[in-house]
Image (cartoon, rainbow, N blue to C red):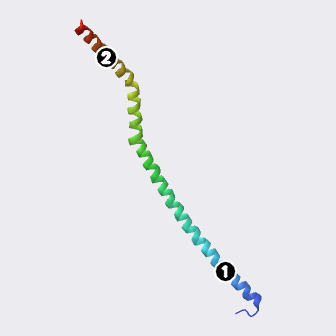
Amino acid sequence: MPADPQSTLYLVLAIGVALLTIFVCVALIYLILIFRDVSKILEKTRDTAERINEFVIKPVTIVSTVVDRIRPIVEAAMERRAEMMEEGSRKKRK
């Protein structure tokens, strides 16, 4: 066992640095594990968002596009029907 105070100080500092190094290594390992779990969660979230986009948003977009294309045809048919109804009521009045 060292007798002088300087040797004792160096021994205590060496033990402290060794313990600090071990603590930092363990903390880094846990940090790596946490980041890996976060990466897995983000990938699952991305997959879920992609599925939602594929099964919900794309069909809604397609239906919206179809409705936008059909709307003028339906409006024209409704106008013709209204005109025919007006002509029919005019003929009944005469």
Say which quadrant the N terminus sits in: bottom right
Nearer the observer: mark 1 or 2; the answer is: 2
Residue position marked by numbered label 1 in the rendering: 16
**With respect to residue 51, does 74 lie above or below?**
above
Residue that lies at the very extreme toward the top in this rendered image: 94
Going from the N terminus, do you reach mark 1 or mark 2 first? 1
Q: Which mark is residue 30?
A: none
**With respect to residue 64, does 76 lie above or below?**
above
Image coordinates of residue 31 in percent, x first then y, are 56, 65
Q: Image quarter for residue 79?
A: top left
Please report the residue visible at 52 percent of the width from the left and 60 percent of the height from the top. 36
Q: Image quarter for residue 59?
A: top left
Q: Image quarter for residue 23?
A: bottom right
Q: Amino acid at mark 2?
A: Ala
**With respect to residue 65, does 94 lie above or below?**
above
- Relative placement, left or right, of 73 versus 94 is right
Image coordinates of residue 57 in percent, x first then y, are 41, 40
Q: Amino acid at mark 1?
A: Gly
Distance between the alpha carbons at the discs numbered 1 and 2:
93 Å
User: 10 Å neighbourhood of mark 2: few (<14), some, or many (≥20)?
Assistant: few
Residue that lies at the very extreme toward the front in this rendered image: 93
Please report the residue visible at 31 percent of the width from the left and 16 percent of the height from the top. 82
Residue position marked by numbered label 2 in the rendering: 82
User: 10 Å neighbourhood of mark 1: few (<14), some, or many (≥20)?
Assistant: few
Q: Nearer the viewer, residue 68 or 7?
A: 68
